[in-house]
Amino acid sequence: MIEWSDTDLIMRDTVREFIDKEVRPHLDGLESGELSPYPFARKLFSEFGLDVMAAEAVKSMLDKQREGARRSGGLGGFAEQASMAAVMVSELAGVSIGLLSTVGVSLGLGAATIMSRGTPAQKERWLPELMTLEKIAAWAITEPDAGSDAFGGMKTYVRRDGSDYLLNGQKTFITNGPYADVLIVYAKLDEGVPGVDRRDRPVLTFVLDAGMPGLTQGKPFKKMGMMSSPTGELFFDNVRLSPDRLLGESEAHTGGDGRDSARANFAAERVGVALMALGIINECHRLCLDYAKTRTLWGKRIAEFQLIQLKLARMEIARINVQNMVFQTLERLKAGQMPTLAEASAIKLYSSEAATEVAMEAVQLFGGNGYMAEYRVEQLARDAKSLMIYAGSNEVQVTHIAKGLLAG
Ligand SMILES: Cc1cc2nc3c(=O)[nH]c(=O)nc-3n(C[C@H](O)[C@H](O)[C@H](O)COP(=O)(O)OP(=O)(O)OC[C@H]3O[C@@H](n4cnc5c(N)ncnc54)[C@H](O)[C@@H]3O)c2cc1C
């Protein structure tokens, strides 16, 4: 793949039109938190028939499961439409990465975990409403004392109580945490096995519903960027969990423990960051070219100054590099190949740094206007920085790249 296909371009223009009409006029409200992102996400889904497609894909998967047919997991119809999804993601990221994240986490992490780890009954219980965005999911691993060291340092725990579990602890920085209807929560089994260090105890994955006794969903945090994505804390005080809330309904899941469940999402999440980075780079590139061609100083357009040209040239290099990484990944996905964790980490690290640098340089190119919210590049710079921190901080990506290089 060396270019977007004609179909991708039609999709891009249609999404762009939708965003210009339905999202851009409300950006101030979304950024201030005055407007909830969820009605916008649902509108996007219904406009492009994604709710109907998702409902059909889930129904057909559940029907097949009921008939006993085997299916390999994944997001049903969405997997085959990788480049269409990529176009949508990058278009939206350039305008409201927060809005995109609410959907991305709900589907790509929340629903996807139930899809890959749940029993047929669990899929039937939660997926139909999640896949159509009627309900929103959160995916909670991070804790105040366990971010990069998520599993070893995890303090949130469950204790067996008859056939149930009691959940206690706290999570933080959870996308959709304040408003999620369904919450995927990772917790350590707090039962000492002689000789097994607390850090190495099994991690189990549960599904909670909003409103359960003992569950508190905190208010949205004030953040640097991604304002339209509510991020918050979760508190668990003796939340009683029946065994049908343990994903797979077995402590010995065939897919490994909660660590494996979370790791299974890492590569896809990191490729997703590259798509978002591409969206931010494209938007900065477009805004800067327009501005450089129209802003006049000393009787010249600033595009004629070599130092401005250097900024534009570096943006173009970042755009080509990140786009090529995205194209190569899409091509491999179409051939049924997922990048290795080390490759996905390298893509994530490079593209998030490139987007942050491009967006900061965009602010600089706009001068004082760049520092003003009206010109949007300051929002893009604040948004881009988040890409270097979540989905595994960039320092942690280095460790994963090195591990891949040094293995064997
Ligand atoms: C906007 C946003 C949304 C998020 N959404 C979610 C969500 O939905 N669900 C969820 O579970 N989490 C979520 N997170 C949490 C995110 O995954 C963590 O913030 C991230 O993993 C980093 O953990 P930390 O914040 O605890 O930083 P720390 O782990 O405390 O890191 C502090 C510093 O140490 C560095 N560091 C850590 N380990 C090493 C090492 N081995 N070598 C060198 N340097 C190292 C880090 O890179 C960082 O610079 C979100 C975060 C943000 C900002």
Image: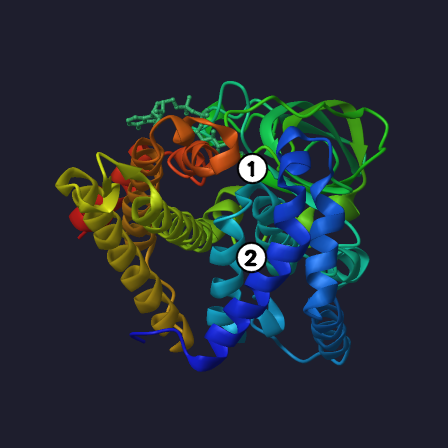
Look at the numbered disc 2 and give the secondary structure of its residue: loop
Q: In which quarter of the image is residue 210?
A: top right
Name the foreground residue: 255 vs 298: 298
Residue 67 seen in this snapshot: yes
Q: Is mark 1 on a helix, strand or loop?
A: strand
Specify which label sits upstream in the sequence, 1 or 2: 1
Give x and y (percent) for residue 299.
23, 39
Coloured how? rainbow
Quadrant of the rendering where the N terminus is positioned: bottom left
Relative to 128, is 351 on the left or the right?
left
Beta carbon of the mark 2 residue lies under 8 A of ligand 1: no
Residue receiving disc 2: 254
Q: State the residue in front, 307 or 228.
A: 307
Which sits in the foreground, 124 or 281?
281
Q: In which quarter of the image is residue 388?
A: top left
> Counting other residues with Cα less than 10 Å from the Cα at mark 1, is it few (<14), some (14-19), or many (20 or more)?
many
Q: Which mark is residue 276?
A: none
With 256 as the anchor, is 283 left or right in this view? left
> Is residue 406 toward the left or the right of residue 239 in the image?
left
Q: Where is residue 290 in the image (x, y as percent from the top left)?
A: 37, 50
Q: How far apart are marks 1 and 2 (CA)?
A: 14 Å
| Mark 1 CB near ligand 1 (8 Å cut) | no
Question: What amino acid is at disc 1?
Answer: Val
Q: Which residue matches tag 1?
A: 203
Which of the four quarters of the rendered structure image does ligand 1 lie in?
A: top left
Instruction: Determine the residue positioned at 53% across, 44% down.
Output: 97
- Seen from the viewer's position, the closer of residues 336 and 156 is 336
